[in-house]
């Protein structure tokens, strides 16, 4: 790789599946939110999540159940609301991994977001879109050659970004100014 970049059709396909899920449930209205602070929050969260799953792998558990995959989507969805709340309140992120794999995900966010996020189906739609996409592409040689965590985390990354967008849109609709977006 002369330029240090590569292209992944698998990653692009997973991203499209997540965006399609968000459009299907009409959870976002406009363009995706772009914020350096939310990008840093995403990086911090995903490094912690990957480390937790790496520890799990080292202890002999290589696979995730459907329930654990669903929990991961709910987890990043909740953490997106938390990250947007922290951005608005000019607070640092302190992402805890409680509930990451057991479905008991706490939601530490602005109360407007907590109520709103409990009504949205974005995490469920993204999880289902990922499971469907993976099943439809199971015979794909490129996908078979990948570490299974790569497409999953690509989907989770997009779920996080879409969830941040939904959170910002909700707060802005309520008249709240969200700095840096």
Image (spheres, rainbow, N blue to C red):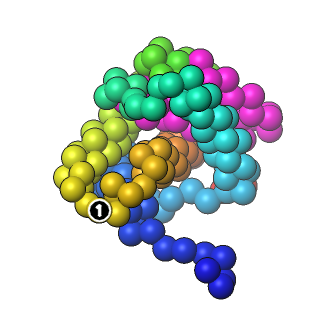
Q: Please tell me which residue lies in front, 108 or 8.
A: 8
For mark 1, give the secondary structure.
Answer: helix
Q: In which quarter of the image is residue 44?
A: top right
68 left or right, relative to 51: left
Q: Position of residue 181 (x, y in %)?
A: 66, 56
Q: Can residue 1 be seen in this view?
A: yes
Instruction: Classify 10 Å Cα crowding around label 1: few (below 14), some (14-19), many (20 and above).
Output: few
127 left or right, relative to 89: left
Q: Where is residue 126 in the image (x, y as percent from the top left)?
A: 35, 42
Q: In this view, does 95 lie above or below 135?
A: above
Residue sitting at x 40%, y 25%: 68
Give the residue at mark 1: 141
Seen as rendered, the residue at the extreme bottom is: 2
Residue 142 colored magenta? no
* Magenta part of the chain: 70-98
Residue sitting at x 54%, y 74%: 6
Q: How many labels does the image show?
A: 1
Q: Is residue 162 visible?
A: no
Residue sitting at x 80%, y 34%: 91
Q: Position of residue 72 (x, y in %)?
A: 46, 31
Image quadrant occupied by the N terminus: bottom right
Predominant secondary structure, magenta span: helix
Residue sitting at x 59%, y 18%: 98
Q: Where is residue 19 in the image (x, y as percent from the top left)?
A: 37, 56
Q: Please tell me which residue lies in front, 70 or 60.
A: 60
61 left or right, relative to 130: right
Q: Please tell me which residue lies in front, 1 or 45.
A: 1
Q: In this view, does 55 lie above or below 144?
A: above
Q: In which quarter of the image is residue 108?
A: top right
Residue 89 colored magenta? yes
């Amino acid at each position: 790789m002369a330029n240090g970049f590569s292209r992944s059709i698998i990653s692009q396909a997973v991203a499209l599946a997540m965006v399609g899920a968000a459009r299907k449930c009409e959870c976002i209205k406009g363009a995706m939110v772009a914020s350096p602070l939310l990008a840093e929050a995403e990086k911090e969260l995903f490094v912690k999540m990957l480390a937790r799953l790496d520890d799990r792998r080292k202890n002999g558990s290589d696979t995730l159940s459907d329930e654990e995959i669903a929990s991961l989507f709910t987890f990043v969805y909740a953490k997106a609301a938390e990250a947007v709340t922290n951005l608005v309140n000019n607070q640092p992120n302190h992402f805890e991994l409680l509930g990451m794999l057991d479905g008991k995900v706490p939601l530490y966010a602005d109360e407007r977001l907590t109520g709103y996020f409990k009504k949205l189906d974005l995490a469920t739609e993204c999880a289902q879109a990922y499971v469907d996409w993976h099943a439809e592409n199971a015979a794909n040689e490129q996908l078979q050659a990948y570490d299974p965590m790569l497409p999953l985390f690509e989907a989770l990354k997009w779920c996080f970004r879409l969830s941040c967008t939904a959170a910002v849109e909700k707060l802005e609709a309520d008249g709240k100014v969200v700095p840096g977006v």
